[in-house]
């Protein structure tokens, strides 16, 4: 899917639209995505800060989609495990940045070339407007070649 169409569709996808989550930037090669979320009356929690579920949603499913678009149709890619650690209350606009490097893609291809499953882990920081980390999400992604029988 063309990256501009993907950005448009995600930004109007109801689960993101109604939480205030938006893709602020996506590179044409799907190697960089920046997601932002402003604090609104409808996405605040009981104490007036960002609802934790929305913070977690900011990180799903972007790494998986980036990897699918970079590895191609020969690979099976899905989120296997995620964990979030809340570090500070989130106020104002928060953001999460995702980046896929050529080195990572080479590592994945090397570790899956014989039909093996590969489980890379990614840490994504969610930061506030001052650059302070308010939450850290750790994701494990399941990757293997589709034609393997492992």
Image (cartoon, rainbow, N blue to C red):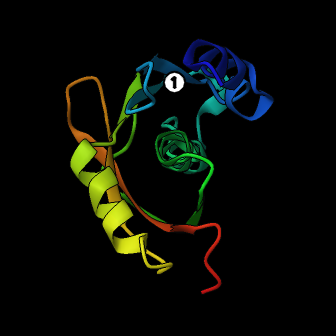
Say which of 18 and 70 sits in front: 70
Q: Please rate how many residues cluster around mark 1, counting C-alpha atoms within 10 Å: few if below 14, some from 14 to 19, many from 20.
A: some
Above or below, 56 against 110 in this view is: above
How many numbered marks does the figure carry?
Answer: 1
Q: Quadrant of residue 136?
A: bottom left
Q: Position of residue 149 (x, y in %)?
A: 65, 84
Seen at 37% across and 44% down, the residue is 89
Q: Position of residue 130 (x, y in %)?
A: 20, 25
Seen at 56% across and 22% down, the residue is 22
Q: Does residue 10 appear in the picture of this structure?
A: yes
Q: Which residue is mark 1?
A: 39
Quick one: quadrant of the N terminus?
A: top right
Per the image, label 1 sits on a secondary structure element best described as loop
Say which of 25 and 57 sits in front: 25
- 69 relative to 87 in the view: left or right: right
- 139 relative to 97 in the view: left or right: right
Q: Position of residue 110 (x, y in %)?
A: 32, 67
């Amino acid at each position: 899917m063309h990256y501009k169409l993907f950005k448009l569709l995600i930004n109007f996808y109801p689960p993101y639209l109604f939480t205030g989550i938006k893709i602020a930037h996506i590179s044409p090669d799907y190697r960089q995505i920046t997601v932002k979320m402003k604090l609104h009356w409808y996405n605040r929690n009981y104490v007036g800060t960002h609802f934790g579920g929305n913070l977690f949603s900011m990180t799903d499913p972007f790494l998986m989609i980036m990897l699918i678009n970079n590895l191609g149709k020969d690979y099976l890619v899905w989120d296997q495990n995620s964990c979030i650690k809340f570090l500070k209350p989130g106020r104002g606009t928060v953001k999460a940045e995702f980046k896929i490097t050529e080195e990572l893609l080479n590592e994945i291809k090397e570790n899956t070339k014989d039909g093996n499953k590969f489980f890379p882990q990614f840490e994504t920081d969610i930061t506030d407007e001052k650059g302070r980390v308010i939450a850290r999400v750790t994701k494990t992604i399941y990757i293997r070649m589709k034609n393997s029988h492992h």
